[in-house]
C-alpha cells in the first residue's frame, strides 16, 4: 500500500522522507496555529518520560507529537478548508450524486459495471476499465453480497444468486473503540461556545472569513500519542488523541441543549483490536 499512499500525498513537511509523497492530489500540512493547550499536553507527555515523535507515519510510530491535517495548502482560493478524499477524485472524474448502487454486474467472472437507482430510475453503468467498490466498512460488503459475492449459504438464505462463494466478505470486522476523558476547565482556551469565549470566537470567525486562518481552519485533532501499555511490546497498542474543544451538555430542563463550560478531551483508543465480528446481510435489497 505504501506506494499508493506516497502517490496520493503532497506533504509540505518531511521533504527528505522516503515514506511521504510531495506531488499527489491530497495536500497534507501542519496545523498553522495550534491551540495553546496543545503545548501543555506535549509538556505533560514529556514530563512523564514519553518520547517526542513529529512523524507518526514515519519508520517509528511510538511517541507524542503534533498531528497534520488535509488542507488546500497550494490553493490561495481554497486554503484553510479541509481537503476530503472525494474532492481530488472528483476533480479527475466527475461522478453521480444521489445514486444508490444496487449491485455490481458480473459477467464471465469479471465486474463490468454497476446497477444504480437514481430518484426511482434504475440504470446500468458500464465500466471502461475496472470497478472499484469503496463504500466503507459496512456498505462495501453489503454491495458485494447483494451482487452474489460472499458466503454462498448465507446468500441463498436470502434468495440471492451466488456469483462467487467468498466467505470472508462481511467477516473479520474490526471495531474502533475509544473512551472519552473530559476535563472541565476554569479558563476559555479550548475551542468551544460560551459567553466568556464570545468575543474571541467573533474574532476567529472574522479571521477565517478574511484570511482562512485560526481555529476554524483547524481539524481540532491537533496532538496525538502512540504508546505502549507494557514496555516489552514490539509496537504501541494505545493511542491518545488530544482535542482542545468544548462540549455541549444536555441539562434539565432545557432538553434542546445548553452550552457547558470549556472542556478538553482525550480519547484513549485501542488501535490494534484483537476481537473480530461480522456484518451479515439481512435482506436481498439495498
Image: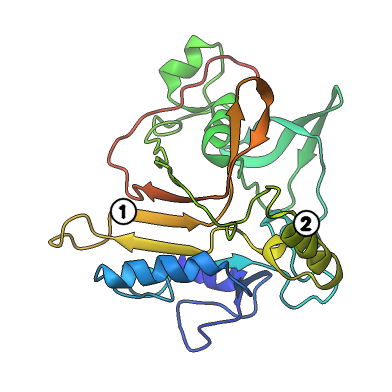
Tell whether label 2 touches label 1 (CB within 8 Å): no
The Cα atoms of the two marked residues, 1 and 2, are separated by: 35 Å
Mark 2 closeness class: few <14, some 14–19, many ≥20 residues within 10 Å: few
Count of numbered tags: 2
Residue 18 quadrant: bottom left
Q: Kindly indicate the quadrant of the structure image that contains residue 104.
A: top right
Where is 21 relative to 1, above or below? below
Q: Position of residue 161 (x, y in %)?
A: 56, 18
In this figure, which residue is indicated by the disc labeled 1? 238
Residue at the image position 62 percent from the left and 73 percent from the top: 33
Q: Quadrant of residue 49?
A: bottom left
Image check: 31 left or right of 162? right
Residue 182 lies, with reference to residue 208, above or below; the image says: above
Q: Find residue 275 and report its horizontal and vertical position in percent.
A: 29, 36
Q: Secondary structure at mark 2?
A: helix
In the rendered structure, which disc, 1 or 2, sits on the residue that comes first in sequence? 2
Quick check: can you spot residue 33?
Answer: yes
| Outermost residue, bottom side | 16
Mark number for residue 62? none
Residue at x 42% of width, y 48% of height: 267
Mark 1 against mark 2, which lies toward the viewer? Answer: 1
Residue 212 position within the rendered picture, expressed as x and y whole percent measured from the top left? 78, 69
Residue under the image location 78 percent in, 64 percent down: 203
Looking at the rendered structure, the secondary structure element under dot 1 is strand
Please state which of residues 223 and 280 is positioned toward the viewer in this rendering.
223
172 or 70, nearer to the observer: 70
Identify residue for label 2. 90
Amino acid at each position: 500500500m505504501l506506494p499508493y499512499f506516497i502517490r496520493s500525498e503532497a506533504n509540505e513537511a518531511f521533504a527528505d522522507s522516503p515514506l511521504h509523497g510531495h506531488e499527489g492530489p491530497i495536500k497534507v500540512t501542519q496545523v498553522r496555529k495550534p491551540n495553546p493547550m496543545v503545548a501543555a499536553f506535549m509538556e505533560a507527555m514529556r514530563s512523564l518520560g514519553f518520547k517526542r515523535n513529529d512523524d507518526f507515519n514515519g519508520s517509528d510510530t511510538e511517541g507524542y507529537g503534533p498531528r497534520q491535517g488535509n488542507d488546500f495548502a497550494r490553493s490561495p482560493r481554497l486554503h484553510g478548508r479541509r481537503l476530503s478524499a472525494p474532492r481530488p477524485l472528483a476533480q479527475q472524474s466527475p461522478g453521480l450524486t444521489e445514486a444508490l448502487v444496487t449491485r455490481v454486474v458480473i459477467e464471465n467472472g469479471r465486474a463490468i459495471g454497476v446497477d444504480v437507482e437514481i430518484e426511482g430510475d434504475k440504470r446500468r453503468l458500464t465500466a471502461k476499465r475496472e470497478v472499484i467498490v469503496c463504500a466503507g466498512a459496512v456498505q462495501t460488503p453489503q454491495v458485494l453480497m447483494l451482487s452474489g459475492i460472499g458466503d454462498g449459504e448465507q446468500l441463498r438464505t436470502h434468495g440471492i444468486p451466488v456469483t462467487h462463494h467468498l466467505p470472508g466478505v462481511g467477516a473479520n470486522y474490526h471495531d474502533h473503540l475509544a473512551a472519552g476523558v473530559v476535563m472541565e476547565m476554569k479558563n476559555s482556551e479550548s475551542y468551544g461556545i460560551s459567553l466568556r469565549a464570545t468575543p474571541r470566537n467573533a474574532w476567529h470567525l472574522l479571521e477565517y472569513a478574511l484570511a482562512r486562518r485560526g481555529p476554524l481552519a483547524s481539524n481540532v485533532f491537533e496532538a496525538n500519542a502512540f504508546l505502549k501499555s507494557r514496555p516489552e511490546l514490539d509496537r504501541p497498542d494505545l493511542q491518545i488523541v488530544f482535542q482542545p474543544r468544548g462540549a455541549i451538555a444536555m441539562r434539565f430542563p432545557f432538553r434542546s441543549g445548553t452550552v457547558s463550560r470549556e472542556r478538553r478531551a482525550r480519547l484513549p483508543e485501542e488501535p490494534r483490536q484483537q476481537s473480530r465480528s461480522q456484518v451479515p446481510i439481512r435482506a436481498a435489497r439495498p
